[in-house]
Image (cartoon, helix red, strand yellow):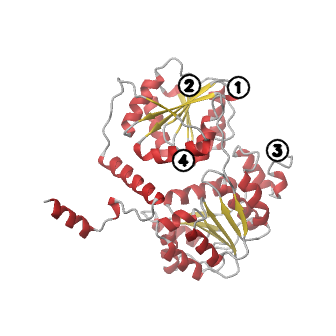
């Protein structure tokens, strides 16, 4: 544990939180954490402007955990609003990770087939709810989610909430929350829309605006392969694994599902004893054993989600392969920083689909460096996209275009009547 003024010790967090922070592999707070945690602990309202990947989730989670301190009653005392199911689950994962010794109960609320289970868990009691706007309102109107004891309200990714058209739902939520509460708003940008909604509910805030400063190590060579599909990624992976220069390799992917698919693939082609997997479902002991086996070169491959990107310092990692492009851009720097350590040479390889190109441009801008493009070897089998994969890529590209131009109308936002008229004209 770092006990100087650069560590978490001086932020007035309790021992339960400090122990969880250490076990999560963190020793020094990020800039936004250092600036947000003290005023948030004092109960002040916060507006935090920072790029995704700068640690802002922990910046608001840690003060909430510290103030709530222990389970109490059946009704939630903190509400966090996020734009997507994925971000909601990511937030609850951080809360579970950092609050593991507090006993505080957290529930993710989002649409889908788990809705009845969410109602049951609300009835059993919880302390913190993280959810998407529509589902929070639905549970509130049905009487399952009681909001009268909310003391801490967080709006995360506010700009994206605006982009996705959630403004009416957000105002409805604000109307039913208790007046006396702490408010925190976080966003990657402070546009006029975000400023307007912040003016509606964040009174006399402490404003924290973090300008990202990201650099990559000079000893790491970075390469990009452009691929069309998941299947082609696997084809390329097999080719790369057969190269002699690939020694000890960390493969990063964005989800536990993908990590498990890669594990099954590597097991089939290289055997059970060649790899270990690190992700959020693994116990702390399992993760420590995996890192130890990799450090001692008992295994060649370590498959990891970004829960393992920070805090791992293992010598001799020849390559980092980004099977997926991280959408938290700072994670790219942390990932590739697992190689090229202690002035050794290292190499990173990133597999990029058309839907990833937008994110790569953002990563290059933050890093101040163009990443070298490499031609796919001729022997790589190009696997066509499935219909579902094509649809997902097209929807993501549409979302990116709307992000750059709010007036953009993608193909997935036309009404059925418009689509029928277009088809009629083509005939």
Q: Do the residues labelled 2 and 1 touch (CB within 8 Å)?
A: no
Find disc 2 in the rendering and name its residue: 300
Which is nearer the N-term, disc 1 or disc 4?
1
Q: Do the residues labelled 4 and 2 touch (CB within 8 Å)?
A: no
Disc 4 residue crowd, few under 14, some 14–19, many 20+, Cα 10 Å: few
Q: Nearer the viewer, mark 4 or mark 2?
A: 4
Asked whether 91 or 102 is in front, the reply is 91
Find disc 3 in the rendering and name its residue: 2
- Position of residue 6 relative to residue 238, above or below, is below
Residue 264 seen in the current view: yes
Find disc 4 in the rendering and name its residue: 362
Q: Find residue 119 and report its horizontal and vertical position in percent.
A: 51, 70
Q: Find residue 86 and report its horizontal and vertical position in percent.
A: 51, 56
Disc 1 residue crowd, few under 14, some 14–19, many 20+, Cα 10 Å: few
Task: Name the mark on residue 57.
Answer: none
Q: Which residue is depicted at the point 82% across and 44% down? A: 2
Pick the quarter of the image with the N terminus. Answer: top right
Disc 2 residue crowd, few under 14, some 14–19, many 20+, Cα 10 Å: many
Left/right placement of residue 142 relative to residue 314 reads left
Which is nearer the N-term, disc 3 or disc 4?
3
Which is nearer the N-term, disc 2 or disc 1?
2
Cα–Cα span, label 3 and label 2: 31 Å
Find disc 1 in the rendering and name its residue: 343
Could you say whether the residue bearing mark 3 is in a helix, strand or loop?
Answer: loop
Which is nearer the N-term, disc 3 or disc 2?
3
Residue 280 seen in the current view: no
Cα–Cα span, label 1 and label 4: 27 Å
Q: Do the residues labelled 3 and 1 touch (CB within 8 Å)?
A: no
Which is nearer the N-term, disc 3 or disc 1?
3
């Amino acid at each position: 544990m770092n006990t100087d003024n650069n560590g978490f010790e001086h932020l007035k967090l309790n021992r339960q939180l400090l122990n969880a922070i250490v076990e999560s592999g963190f020793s020094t707070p990020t800039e936004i954490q250092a600036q947000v945690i003290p005023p948030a602990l004092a109960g002040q309202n916060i507006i935090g402007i920072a790029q995704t990947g700068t640690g802002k989730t922990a910046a608001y989670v840690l003060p909430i955990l510290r103030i709530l301190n222990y389970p109490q009653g059946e009704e939630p005392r903190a509400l966090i609003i996020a734009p997507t199911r994925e971000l909601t689950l990511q937030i609850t994962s951080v809360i579970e990770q950092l609050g593991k010794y507090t006993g505080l109960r957290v529930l993710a609320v989002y649409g889908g087939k788990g809705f009845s289970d969410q109602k049951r868990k609300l009835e059993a009691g919880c302390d913190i709810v993280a959810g998407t706007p529509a589902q929070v309102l639905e549970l509130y109107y049905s009487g399952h989610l009681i909001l009268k004891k909310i003391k801490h309200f967080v709006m995360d990714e506010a700009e994206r909430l605006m982009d996705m058209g959630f403004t009416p739902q957000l105002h409805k939520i604000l109307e039913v929350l208790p007046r006396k509460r702490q408010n925190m708003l976080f966003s990657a940008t402070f546009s006029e829309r975000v400023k307007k909604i912040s003016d509606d509910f964040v009174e006399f805030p402490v404003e924290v605006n973090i300008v990202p400063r990201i650099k990559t190590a000079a000893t790491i060579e970075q390469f990009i392969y452009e691929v069309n599909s998941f299947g082609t990624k696997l084809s390329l992976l097999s080719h790369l694994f057969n190269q002699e220069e690939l020694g000890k390799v960390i493969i990063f992917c964005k989800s536990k599902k993908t990590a498990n698919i890669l594990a099954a693939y590597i097991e089939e082609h290289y055997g059970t004893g060649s790899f270990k997997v690190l992700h959020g479902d693994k116990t702390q002991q399992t993760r420590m054993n995996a890192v130890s086996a990799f450090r001692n070169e008992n295994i060649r491959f370590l498959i990891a989600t970004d829960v393992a990107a920070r805090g791992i310092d293992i010598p001799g990692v020849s390559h980092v392969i980004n099977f997926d492009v991280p959408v938290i851009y700072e994670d790219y720097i942390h990932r590739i920083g697992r190689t090229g350590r202690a002035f050794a040479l290292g190499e990173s390889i990133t597999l990029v689909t058309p839907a990833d190109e937008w994110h790569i441009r953002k990563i290059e801008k933050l890093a101040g460096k163009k990443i070298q493009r490499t031609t796919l070897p001729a022997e790589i089998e190009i696997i066509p996209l499935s219909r579902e994969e094509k649809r997902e890529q097209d929807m993501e590209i549409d979302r990116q275009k709307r992000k750059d131009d709010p007036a953009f109308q993608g193909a997935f936002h036309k009404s059925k009547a418009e689509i029928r008229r277009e088809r009629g004209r083509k005939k």
